[in-house]
Amino acid sequence: MNRRDGRTADMLRPVEIIPNTNAFAEGSCIIKCGATMVYITASVEDRVPPHVAEGCGWVTAEYNMLPRANRTRSRRDVSKLKLSGRSAEIQRLIGRSLRSAVDMEKLGPHCITVDCDVLQGDGGTRTASVTGGWVALKLACRKLLEAGLIDEDPVIHQVAAVSAGLVEEEALLDLQYYEDSGAQVDLNCVMNERGELIEIQGTGEGRAFTVLEQQRLVSLCQKGIQELMVKQTCALTGGAE
């Protein structure tokens, strides 16, 4: 099929990660994936939840979509006096993904909360949040190291995420909204720098799909994630691709 933006089936949207966008948070960035834009901060507190083992740290996440991030205005979760099911599910995914990158013993008795606020959504907000969230998390841990509050970097893995799907029977990487809304199969994939899977969320929206189709989509995601990790590294080092 011909994609509206002219991309080939295995091509990411243009990606930009702008680090250090908040003057107060220990780590922060804005990630842009095509028209999708997420503002992310990582905040450090010297206390951890009760369930965390003594001497260990914790990483968690919150996700929110601003009222006019989409084509029509949505109500803020606070106006409904509860978190929407979608927001709760996405922030749990982000938290799980980022915790997989961290050695909690090395983090020590610190809790890092990664807040992901969607400024504009055109598909892939959860995967952009994971990818940008890792950058903000890494920057926060860098601040802890520089301040002498931890002895070594607790970030032991690089983590990124992207979507793929079957649209008009064709496997496509990095779906934007018009593709995602009409996809027969939608799959979100989180991986580390080793190419190991952290999480797969795959749904047959229009039809069931085979294991071979799933593998094809995961392979597309792996290619995209490798490219996203180059973007992450450039954002952290200030280097060119």
Image (tube, rainbow, N blue to C red):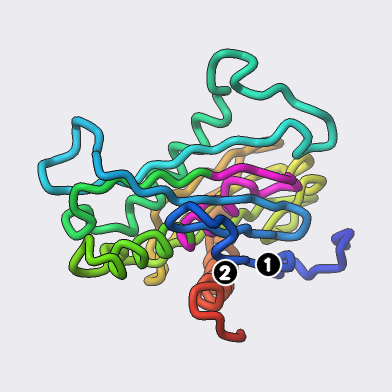
Give yes or no for contact between labels 2 and 1 (Cβ–Cβ under 8 Å).
Answer: yes
Q: Secondary structure at mark 2?
A: helix
Asked which quadrant contains residue 49, the reply is: top left
User: Label 1: which residue?
Assistant: 15
- Name the residue type under label 2: Leu
Instruction: Point out residue 181 in the picture as x, y percentages from the top left corner.
Output: 76, 40
Q: Could you classify mark 2 by the number of other residues whose Cα lies within 10 Å: few (under 14), some (14-19), or many (20 or more)?
A: many
Q: Could you classify mark 1 by the number of other residues whose Cα lies within 10 Å: few (under 14), some (14-19), or many (20 or more)?
A: some
| Above or below for 140 versus 7 | above
Instruction: Point out residue 80 in the picture as x, y percentages from the top left corner.
Output: 62, 14
Q: Quadrant of the N terminus?
A: bottom right
Residue located at (64% from left, 45% from top): 186
Give the magenta-colored segment's residue range. Answer: 116-135
Residue located at (32% from left, 44% from top): 45
Instruction: Point out residue 24 in the picture as x, y percentages from the top left corner.
Output: 49, 53
76 left or right of 81?
right
Residue 133 falls within the magenta-colored stretch: yes
Q: Quadrant of the C terminus?
A: bottom right
Closer to the camera in the image, 23 or 162: 23
76 left or right of 212?
right
Instruction: Point out residue 23 in the picture as x, y percentages from the top left corner.
Output: 54, 57
Give the numbered dot on residue 149.
Answer: none
| Above or below for 201 versus 141 | above
Give the numbered dot on residue 228.
Answer: 2
Asked which quadrant contains residue 183, the reply is: top right
- Name the residue type under label 1: Val
Q: Secondary structure at mark 1?
A: strand
User: Which is nearer the N-term, disc 2 or disc 1?
Assistant: 1
Closer to the camera in the image, 112 or 89: 112
Residue located at (31% from left, 70% from top): 146
